[in-house]
Image (tube, helix red, strand yellow):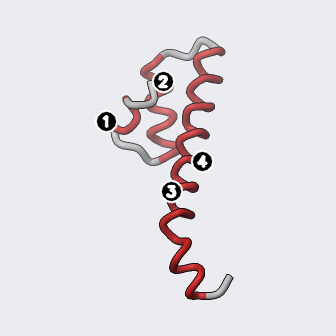
Amino acid sequence: MGPVLQEIMEPELREAEQRGREEGIHGTVEILQEFGISGEEIRNAIMKRYKLTEQEAAKFL
């Protein structure tokens, strides 16, 4: 991709990357819940894995 096209596409690429990351976190949370993992353990796991603050992690629970 050329530099001009990359500059034009960058906001869309970042947004798509963020959506993919959020989908991954939601998937992780769902799987851990299915295994009966407590909310606190899930929060700690996603905070560590995805480098989230407590407030950010709480949005996924």
**As drawn, 49 above or below 1:** above
Residue at the image point whose x is 60% and y is 47% from the top: 20
What residue is pinned by disc 4?
20
Q: CA distance from mark 1 to mark 2?
A: 15 Å
Classify 41 as above or below 10. Answer: above
| Image quadrant where residue 36 sits | top right
Q: Amino acid at mark 3?
A: Glu
To which residue does mark 2 refer? 41
Callout 4 amino acid: Gly
Compared to 23, does 13 lie above or below? below
Q: Nearer the viewer, mark 1 or mark 3?
A: 3
The disc, 3 or 4, on the residue closer to the chain's N-terminal end is: 3
Q: Which residue is mark 1?
A: 55
**Taking 13 as reference, is 58 above or below it?**
above
Q: Are marks 3 and 4 in contact (CB under 8 Å)?
A: no
The kind of secondary structure element at disc 4 is helix
Q: Nearer the viewer, residue 10 or 42?
A: 10
Question: Mark 1 vs mark 4: which is more N-terminal?
Answer: 4
Q: Earlier in the sequence, mark 1 or mark 2?
A: 2
The residue tagged 3 is 15
9 vs 58, nearest the viewer: 9
For disc 2, the neighbor class at 10 Å (few under 14, some 14 to 19, many from 20) is: few
Tell me: 42 left or right of 33: left
